[in-house]
Each structure stands twice: as C-alpha cells, then as structure tokens.
Image (tube, grey):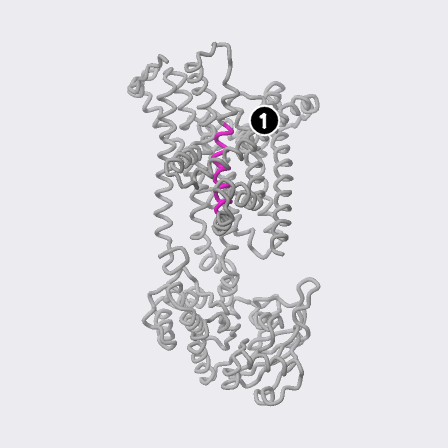
C-alpha cells in the first residue's frame, strides 16, 4: 500500500503561490484580451462587408479546429523563429514565452468571439432599427444599444469561459512556464513526491473552479429571477 | 371502479388537494371541472399514480394506488390516459405509437398489436395517416391518435386530462365526438374538462373543484339546474360568457 | 529569410533507417484516431448513464451523478491526465497498480491512462448534454410513457432517450471534436500521437514549418471528417414533421 508523505508541501507553498499568481495573471490577461479581440472578431463576422466576414470566420474556425497544445507549440517553437528572421533579432532575445502567451490569448479569443457573436445575435433586430431611426450610426448603435444589452446576457457565459480558460492555463506547461501546475510538478519531481503534489494541485484547481462555477450559477439564478419580473 | 377517499396532497407547505373523496362506478362518466389551479389535473393524475399523494386512499378496480407494494406499471397499463398536450412520441410513426406499449408492456406480438392499433386508428377516422409522424398531423388528429393509443391497451377505464384545451376551436369537436361515442359504448371515464356541452350530453355526475377541494359532487341535472355553491354558480356563469 | 523549404522530407528515411517520416506521421494519426474514438465510445456510455441518473426521481442517485460531473469538470485535463498516469498506478489497492506497472508495456500504460482520462473527462460534459436534452423534452412525455404502463427504465429507453439524443446531436458533435483536440494533451505523458510526432519531426528533420503545417492540416481534416459524419447522423435521426426538420 502506498504511504503518503505530504511533508514537502508546506515548505513549497511560497513557490506554489508564485506559480498560482502566474496562472491568475495569464488568466486575467487572456480574458481581457480575449473579450476585446473576440468582440472585434464577432462584430467583423456580423458586419455587412463580405471579405471581413470571411476573414473573421476563417480565423475563428481555424483556431477552434486546432488543439490548444498545437497552437502553443506553434507559438513557442515556430513563430519566434519567424520573428527572429523578420526583425533580425539577436539570438539572445528569447521571445518564446511571450510568443506562447500571445498564442494562448489569440486562441481563447476565438472561443470568446463565438460567445459574443451569439450574445449580439440574441439582441432583437428591432433594436438596431430603433437606434438607426434615432439617427445613430452603425458604430453608435453597436456601442450604445446592442453591446450593452448583449454583454448583460452574456456575463454568465463569459465567466464560465474564464473558468475554462483558467484550467487551460495549465497547458502552458508545454512551454516550460512556471505556472501553478508547472511549479507543483517540479516540486513533486524534485522531492520524489509526485503523487502528493499532483493530488494537491488537482484539489486546489478543483476548489477554485468549483467555487467559481457555483458563484456563476448563483449569479445566473439571480439574473434569471430578475429578468422574469 | 375508481374510489377516491379523503385524498390530500401538498408540495412543501402548499396544499394542492384537501380531503377529496368521490367515486366512479363501472360504466359511469364523471366530469371534473373548476377554475384553473383548483387541483383537478393533480387529482386525476393521482388516480394512476403519476402524482403521489400524502394521505387518503385511491383504489382502482380494487387495487390501492398509494400502496408501495402495488405494481404501478401494471396498474397503469390497465388505465388509459389522454393528456392535454397529446404526448404522442414524436420520433415514432403513428403505427409505432399505437403498438409500442402493446408489444413492450402487454407482450403482444407485433402483428397482433398492429392489427389492433390500425383498427382503432380507423375508428377515430385516421387510418390513412398510419405511416405519418405525429409532427405531420394537426392537433385534433394527434389527440384522436392519442385516444386510440390508450384504447389499444384495452383499458378498464379512461382518464382524460383537459383533452381539448390545447386545441384550436375548430378541432375541439372532432375529439369530443370520439369521446361521446366512447361514453355511449359504456366506457368508464373520468374527464377533466371545461366542455360543458360534452358534460350535458354524456356525464352521469359533475365534480366541481375549487382551491384543492371538491365543492360539489352532483348528478348532472342537479349541477346544471341548481348548483348549491356560490363558487360553482360563478364558474358556470363565466364558462357561458366565453 | 533563408529558410529552405523541403516538402520531400516526409519521404526520406528516419535516422534508424527502417521507415520514412511519413510513416511516423501516419502512425501518430492512427494513435490519435484510435485513442479518441475508443475514449469517445466510453465517454458516451458513461455520460449517458450519468446524465440519466441526474434526471431520475431519486435524490441520492442524482446527487451522486452531479458530484461525478463536478469532479471531472473542475480539474484541468492535464492535471487529470497526470493523476491517471502518475498517481493512480501508485495508489491503486490489491496489487492492481503493480500489475499495471509491471505487466503492461509502457505503450499500453500510456494509451490506457490517456484513454480513461479522456473518456471520464468528456463523459462529464456528455452527461450535462444528456441531462439538458432530457429536460428539454415536454414534461408530459415522461408521464405519457408511465401512463401506458412502461416502467421507468422502459420510459427512458423507448420514450425519453430517443428524442433527447436527437436534440443533442449538435452539442455532442462539438464534444466529439473536442475529444480529438484534447487528445493532443496526451503527448505530455509521452504518448506518440499526432502532436507528439509533430514535435519529434521538428527535432529530427530541422524542417519545422513542413512538419507543423502537415500536423495542423491533419487536425483540420479530422475536424471536417467528424463534422461530416455527425451531419449524416443528424440527417438520419431527423424526425418528420418535428421542429427544425422539413
């Protein structure tokens, strides 16, 4: 029978906390970037200009068809080489990490754009017509009338996607970044206590994600109850 | 045939049925009416155990519905039920709708079940639609198929839960005609309905419910001629102005 | 830029000489497909069972089922994979873990861990869809099944599930696509599936662009094929006269 030994965890807590901060930072950046870029993509897909629609659709469908691991490898291994070639960077400049993070954000933006597109489409068409009738331009109608309503409906979905994204950050492990999971793995490997560290990491992720998803569910219930009145 | 004795039911603190008692004898047609929310649909669903109840007893053909030892599936297979929203199975053809329970529940052969099902489909005037799917029929047609589906089980009695209230007005009569015919053939029926014309034509007794209680349980003529309670009088007046 | 494109690299032999890089690529594709399909079938079975349990009128069963769903939904896939591969064999009782480590080849160990991990991870998502599908049906359907004398299992088998599954073909399609994409995570435990072969090709050939483009294209092809297959399933399952079909 396996003898558990949790003694290496207390000493490693400062490292693990640093790792968690990295994970949370990546999550926050990717959520903000994902929503901003995703909104632009969604608007491009719904725009009347055909080439723009095709470009946005191509981007979203491409990123949604490729595994995140592949995207991260592209941006970790291939893109830095291209950049080095194009910008004549010196061999000492390591852009691999930054590149991987950009790849992560670009990937998540494709998923955000689909949520936002559905949100925009859920706003009745008459609202755009009403805004136009008041003399607003398309951009004004979007910014002042459609998007505020769309985002209110979308908040629970955007938050749920943020939880998924937080879980996805563990995959930056493939780019050797010291996120929470990366640190947990390294500590476990160093002390020969991989079993305990992996279980600990799993429990921490579970507690955070479970609490967050319950909070979202609670918020959504409140939203629904409010909307029903 | 159906005996309901002192049945009460509540969801949490909300009392849905309070001390309801009535009888449906063999060959009788009982119409249950009352304003919406009066508990009449809940009461009829208690008869075949689709809704549990906390106190009182219901027996159908001598079998106690509330007894945990009762084989409810077996009892239900002998009691036909017709729903407000028809509840045909949308993924099956009309023929399959008519035969599936005969085969899977009663153990009849496929041929026997099909034979029986098509005969009943003919009886409700829809033989030509045997190969269609429920979604391709009108509401009135679907409800007639649903009646045929229930009859195919050779039920000892039939429960109707507002069978016409989801129908467009022009389709109500085609369903009522089938029900009247059934009543005249001597089927034992308990019908929750607002169709007072139907009640006048074939009902033996009218049960009037309000706020979870049976307020009146009278012979048809007494109910329509001179309802005893003020609430029943108001209800009848409202129905007539529709 | 000075990069020498060389698409014939796939035809050249690997360092050990027994085969070509193209064969490596295809064996990676084969592993990805085998792994994803077997995990998908298991996920469908587990997910359907769990999804059904979440809708039955029994508090303990539905609580148990929702605990299952929460467990597998709230831990990152990579962490789950490492737990299946590194942790479970250590802590499994009755010599099961030792049997796993000693009697199975490393390849089988990797494949089994990866398959079970993907299956359980996806089954929680399938369960959510199955539950949503059942709950989307009119409430009277269950009552109608029971009123005809069907037992509860018969009601699920003949009445509720056939319609519920038809309703959820689109979300199941995206879960099926996800399992193929998620299988790439399994390269992290050394399983030589498509993404891992891609990395290996980069290391050996020094022709990173060709390798990565080829791998990415293969993932795109998998996507198109799965979507095509599911569209056929959807068309076959279409109910005449039902909403959304003509």
Instruction: Please say if B184 is above or below B36.
Output: below
Q: Quadrant of the C terminus of chain C?
A: bottom left
Residue A110 falls inside the magenta stretch: yes
Residue B101 falls inside the magenta stretch: no
Q: Quadrant of the N terminus of chain C?
A: top left
| Of the pair A103 and B133, the residue shown nearer to us | A103
Residue C51 screen position, x and y as percent: 52, 49
Q: Which residues are magenta?
A: A104-121
Q: Is residue C60 left or right of residue C116?
A: right
Residue C177 falls in image quadrant:
top left
Residue B150 falls in image quadrant:
bottom left
Q: Secondary structure at mark 1?
A: helix
| Of the pair A83 and B206, the residue shown nearer to us | A83
Label 1 CA crowd tier, 10 Å (few <14, some 14–19, many 20+): many
Instruction: Please say if B34 is above or below A201.
Output: below
Q: Which residue is mark 1?
A: A181
Residue B176 screen position, x and y as percent: 45, 79
Residue A154 screen position, x and y as percent: 55, 44
């Amino acid at each position: 029978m396996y003898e558990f030994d949790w003694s290496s965890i207390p000493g490693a807590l400062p490292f693990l906390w640093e790792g968690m901060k990295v994970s949370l930072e990546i999550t926050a950046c990717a959520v903000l970037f994902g929503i901003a870029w995703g909104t632009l993509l969604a608007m491009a897909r719904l725009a009347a200009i055909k080439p723009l629609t095709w470009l946005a659709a191509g981007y979203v469908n491409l990123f949604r068809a490729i595994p995140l691991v592949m995207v991260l490898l592209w941006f970790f291994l291939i893109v830095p080489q291209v950049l080095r070639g194009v910008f004549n960077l010196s061999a000492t400049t390591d852009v691999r990490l930054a590149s991987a993070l950009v790849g992560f954000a670009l990937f998540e933006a494709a998923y955000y754009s689909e949520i936002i597109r559905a949100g925009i489409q859920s706003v009745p068409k008459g609202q755009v017509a009403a805004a136009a009738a008041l003399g607003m331009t398309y951009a004004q109608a979007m910014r002042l009338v459609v998007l505020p309503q769309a985002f209110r409906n979308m908040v629970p979905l955007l938050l749920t996607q943020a939880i998924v994204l937080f879980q996805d950050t563990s995959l930056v492990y493939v780019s050797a970044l010291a996120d929470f999971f990366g640190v947990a793995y390294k500590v476990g490997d160093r002390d020969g206590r991989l079993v305990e560290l992996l279980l600990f990491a799993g429990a921490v992720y579970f507690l955070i994600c479970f609490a967050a998803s319950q909070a979202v569910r609670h918020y959504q219930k409140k939203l629904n109850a409010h909307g029903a009145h | 045939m159906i005996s309901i004795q002192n049945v009460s039911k509540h969801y949490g603190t909300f009392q849905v049925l309070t001390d309801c008692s009535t009888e449906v004898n063999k060959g009788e047609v009982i119409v249950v009416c009352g304003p919406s929310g009066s508990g009449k649909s809940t009461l009829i669903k208690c008869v075949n155990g689709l809704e549990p109840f906390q106190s009182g007893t219901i027996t159908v053909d001598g079998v106690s519905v509330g007894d945990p030892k009762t084989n409810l599936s077996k009892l239900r297979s002998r009691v036909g039920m017709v729903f407000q929203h028809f509840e045909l199975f949308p993924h099956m053809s009309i023929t399959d709708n008519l035969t599936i329970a005969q085969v899977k529940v009663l153990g009849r052969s496929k041929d026997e079940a099909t034979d029986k099902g098509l005969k009943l489909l003919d009886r409700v005037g829809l033989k030509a639609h045997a190969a269609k799917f429920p979604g391709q029929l009108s509401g009135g047609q679907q409800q007639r198929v649903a009646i045929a589906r229930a009859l195919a089980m050779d039920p000892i009695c039939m429960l109707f839960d507002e069978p016409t209230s989801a129908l467009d007005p022009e389709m109500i009569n085609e369903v009522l005609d089938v029900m009247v015919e059934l009543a005249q053939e001597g089927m034992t029926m308990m019908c929750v309905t607002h169709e007072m014309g139907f009640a006048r034509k074939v009902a033996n007794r009218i049960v009037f419910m309000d706020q979870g209680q049976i307020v009146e349980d009278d012979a048809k003529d007494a109910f329509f001629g001179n309802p005893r309670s003020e609430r029943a009088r108001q209800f009848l007046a409202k129905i007539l102005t529709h | 830029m000075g990069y020498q494109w060389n698409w014939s690299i796939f035809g050249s032999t690997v360092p050990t000489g027994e085969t070509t890089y193209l064969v490596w690529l295809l064996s990676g594709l084969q592993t990805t497909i085998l792994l994803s399909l077997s995990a998908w079938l298991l996920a469908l079975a587990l997910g359907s069972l769990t999804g059904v349990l979440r809708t039955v009128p029994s508090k303990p069963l539905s609580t148990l089922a929702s605990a299952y769903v929460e467990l597998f939904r709230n831990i990152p896939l990579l962490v789950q994979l490492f737990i299946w591969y590194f942790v479970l064999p250590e802590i499994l009782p009755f010599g099961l873990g030792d049997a796993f480590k000693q009697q199975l080849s490393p390849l089988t160990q990797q494949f089994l861990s990866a398959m079970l991990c993907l299956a359980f991870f996806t089954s929680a998502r399938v369960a959510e869809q199955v539950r949503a599908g059942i709950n989307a049906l009119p409430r009277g359907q269950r009552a109608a099944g029971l009123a005809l004398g069907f037992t509860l299992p018969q009601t699920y088998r003949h009445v509720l599930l056939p319609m519920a599954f038809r309703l959820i073909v689109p979300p199941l399609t995206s879960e099926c696509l996800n399992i193929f994409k998620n299988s790439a995570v399994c390269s992290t435990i050394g399983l030589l599936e498509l993404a891992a072969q891609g990395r290996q090709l980069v290391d050996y050939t020094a022709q990173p662009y060709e390798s990565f483009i080829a791998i990415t294209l293969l993932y795109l092809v998998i996507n198109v094929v799965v979507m095509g297959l599911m569209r056929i399933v959807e068309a076959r399952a279409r109910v005449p006269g039902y909403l959304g079909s003509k």
